[in-house]
Image (tube, rainbow, N blue to C red):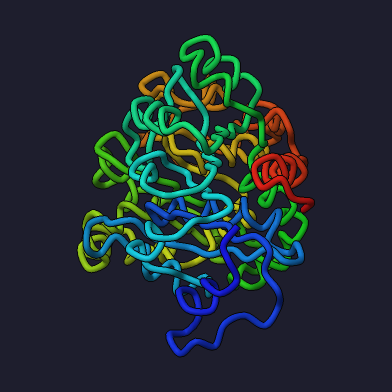
Amino acid sequence: MIEQDKWLVPYGNGGGVGYTRAVDRVVLVVVHSVAAGQRLADAVSAVEEAASIQVVFTRPPGPHGDGVGDFLRSAAVLETSWQQAVRERFDLVVSASPTGIGVLDAPVLLLLGGTASGRLVDHQGRSGVAAIRRLLGRGGDPLLVGLPHRDDVEVVREDFPDIGRQAIVVGDPSFDRLVHMAGRREAVRAELGVQPHGRVGVVLSSRGPESLFGRSHDLLARIGRSRRGQADRLFCQLHPDVWVGHGRRQVLAWSAAARRAGLVIVPPWRDWLDALIAADYVVGDHGVVTCYAAALGKPVLLAHPADRWPTDAVLHGLPVLDPSKKLYAQLAAITGTRPRYHQITSAPHRSSALLRSAFRRLLKYQV
């Protein structure tokens, strides 16, 4: 536990104001990227209402312009510098990536994504096995690796027994939030300016050269020009790293033809789930948000065959977009898709309870 006299200076406003409510435990959230920050914000919501627990965010060293600083400011979190974080003792560190956090003095809860093809990856999609093993080799402070599905845990236990002993199921807090917010669909559509009889299409792209935005240079414009009703709306949601890697001006320039055709590019600071909740159909790639759309039961067309990607089984068997045919004719054939919750998480609606249990285990504290 951080001593109370330390709390007065490092995490105040620089003037020694200190705390108003007594703080017994301090949880440090390490944000390596905007996408990781979005997931972690969903996860810590399970415990941040608990009395006497303060959640503090920090960003490790990274490339200039990675968007993390803007994300933290927009999220209105209490932030401390990485230099200060490495000097302090925390009660718990929570991260979506194992990279670089071995220098922090605390128990660690790693909240990783799924393990398609047995992968444990860091925030850049690279193998995180070596970094996790370095954390295990520290000795002393415990480590838990939280995964969304029991199948993920079984894969890790089989492929990496030393890491598997620390693996637990925590569900998927972001997907649970999406399911919960789906009940506000009509309100969200109204906020987006969608008329009651209008249809909403959403184009989703992950990051990297194999993504929809990376491979299909003119697909956005073709979708934008697709015949549709006057009241219909088309949105495009890009992975935050697309904006970080190329810059806002360049992304808008590359998407100019699509925007002229009526496609709205969702800015990276907008909550990612709004457009997805409002959607009547989705065109996507191998990214996790496309997986969420399919699991939620949205009609999904893939930009490219799913067997190209080591991705979640939820995408396999979904139809692939044929750009030579009319979009609406293809969409008509996939309406009525059934939800596939179980392929995203083995604990739907239970992530908050499972995360609180993991926090209690590591904090040794009732939350």
Quarter of image, res 4: bottom right
User: For this rendering, which residue is in front, 139 or 299?
Assistant: 139
Q: Is residue 273 above or below residue 134?
A: below
Q: Residue at x 47, y 22 (%)?
A: 116
The answer to whether 29 appears left or right of 351 in the picture is left
Horizontal placement of 250 versus 330: left or right?
left
Q: How many marks?
A: 0
Please give left or right for residue 359 compared with residue 109 in the image.
right
Looking at the image, can residue 233 be seen? yes
Q: Name the image quarter holding residue 209.
A: top left
* Nearest to the observer: residue 98 or residue 40: 98
Residue 62: % across, % down:
26, 55
Going 57% across and 45% down the picture, which residue do you hit?
281
Depth check, front residue: 152 or 160: 160
* Residue 128: image location, x then y, percent: 37, 30
In front: 59, or 196? 59
Residue at image x 32%, y 53%?
Answer: 221
- Find the residue positioned furthest to the top: 158
Q: Is residue 263 visible?
A: no
Quadrant holding the N terminus: bottom right
Please state the horizontal and vertical placement of residue 279, each as a whole percent of the image.
60, 52
Classify 128 as above or below 161: below
Task: Give the answer, above or below, for where 330 lies relative to 55.
Answer: above
Measured as percent of width and height from the top left, residue 285 is found at: 42, 36
**Residue at the image point whose x is 57% and y is 34% from the top:** 144
